[in-house]
Amino acid sequence: MNFYYRKKYIDKLLELKDKKYVKVLTGIRWSGKSTILSLFQEKLLKTKSISKNQIIEYDFNKIELQEIAYKELCYQIKAKAQKNKVNYVFLDEVQEIPSWEKCVISLYEEKQIKFDIYITGSNSKLLSTELSTLLTGRHRDIRVMPLSLTEFADVSQNPSLRDAFAKYINIGGLGIIIPNINNEKEVNQDLRMVLEDTINKDIKYRHRNKNNTLINRLIEYVYSVIGKPVSSVNIENYFKSNKIDITRKTIDSYLNWACDAMLLYRVNYFNTKTKTILKTAGKYYAGDLGLLSANIKFNDAIYSFKIENLVFLKFIELGYEVYTSQIYQPNKANKEIDFVAIKDKVISYFQVCETLTDKNYEREINNLLSIRDGNSKNLIVLNDTSTKGDLDRVKRIGLIEFLTREE
């Protein structure tokens, strides 16, 4: 990420250094994983006890390395290793190598040589599934998110968080934006390239659908209804209205692949009475706001959902489980709750809006108050000058304040 120093992630790696875990960094392409590894290596080399020949690195973004077999990779690493010292192994975008996990397990279980292993990947399911099966309890996952608002303001050298926010909500926080951060036209072209590259590499190529244009159409459609309830039935009907045949099973597969690549996040429904999760329908949010803005025609109607999207990504960054909810009303439309956020078994409810007015007070505040389980209720509002203090037992939080929190 043009070597912007992301202290939170590097500090986490320093905390885990030399501990007997495989460190796994996952994140959407261009979220900064490779840069974090590079800066971490610099940190290691600044210590007097670690030399350059103790660092073994492979960047599998390089085409010439993608043909290597896992057995050859394992042999090369062991051949390079120092026999009487800790060897720090960095495997970047490791999912490009078939059966990569067998090499990682072999290094992890090596008795004669000490290895401290760090891997990155742009496919959350691929990494977690393989390692969870073979290294249960012996790996530590670190989700690398796009730049936060605070980091974005720092990179753009904008002392005003509100001014930085106005740009951030349109171009997001992927590393590719940094060189052209003040040229939105160039940034949008770069972001469209990232989306296409991610679809091709992490979805089409991986799942052997190289020439399938329906995947692009599906992601484009879901981006256009971001934050709204959607199901495979809705999507099937949309495609049928455009005279395109596609099955619900295929739609579900494409959506799962897009979520694995972190282009999308699925948010399931949470029953506030039974405290159970419903998986029949859900909402989707983009893995980065820049990808969303660069690939749909901007309109005012989607602005409020972009605000929701930012809040959702912040919850993920802070380590929350995130759900949405509807409260059933006989003969009336269900009451919507934007987010149910859970961490350490504590449940909190959140509504998100641009401005609180007399017109939307019922929807935003009273919907929250209709939940009578004693858990906290919160309103996150962007333009909050007219809503000072708490409201009817609902805690008010300014959106920019929320986006800059570290806890």
Image: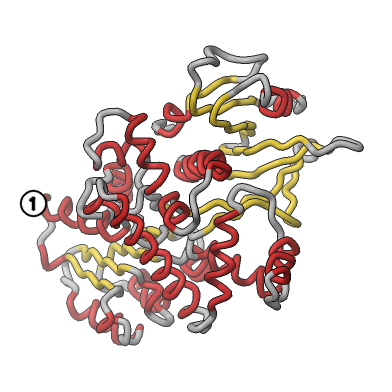
Image quarter where the N terminus lies is bottom left
From this viewpoint, is residue 135 visible? no
Image quarter where the C terminus lies is top left
Choose top left, top right, bottom left or bottom right for residue 87.
Answer: bottom left
Horizontal side, residue 318 vs residue 390: left or right: left
Taking 259 as reference, is 304 above or below it? above
**At 39% from the left edge and 32% from the top edge, which residue is drawn?**
404
- List x then y, in percent, for residue 371: 75, 28
- List x then y, in percent, for residue 81: 19, 73
Taking 347 as reference, is 119 above or below it? below
Query: Hey, which residue is sitting farthest right in the picture?
Result: 331
- List x then y, in percent, for residue 45: 12, 55
Choose top left, top right, bottom left or bottom right for residue 139.
Answer: bottom left
**At 75% from the left edge and 40% from the top edge, which residue is drawn?**
326
From this viewpoint, is residue 374 visible? yes
Q: Residues within 10 Å of mark 1 (few under 14, many from 20)?
A: few
- Visual colour scheme: secondary structure
**At 72% from the left edge and 55% from the top edge, which residue is drawn?**
281
Secondary structure found at label 1: loop
Horizontal side, residue 172 vs residue 56: left or right: right
- List x then y, in percent, for residue 110: 32, 73
User: Viewer-proximal residue, 196 or 319?
Assistant: 196
Taking 304 as reference, is 243 above or below it? below
Horizontal side, residue 220 vs residue 92: left or right: right
User: Viewer-proximal residue, 248 or 66?
Assistant: 248
User: Viewer-proximal residue, 204 or 226?
Assistant: 226
Choose top left, top right, bottom left or bottom right for residue 219.
Answer: bottom right
Q: Amino acid at mark 1?
A: Lys
**At 80% from the left edge and 38% from the top edge, which residue is drawn?**
334
The residue that mark 1 highlights is 48
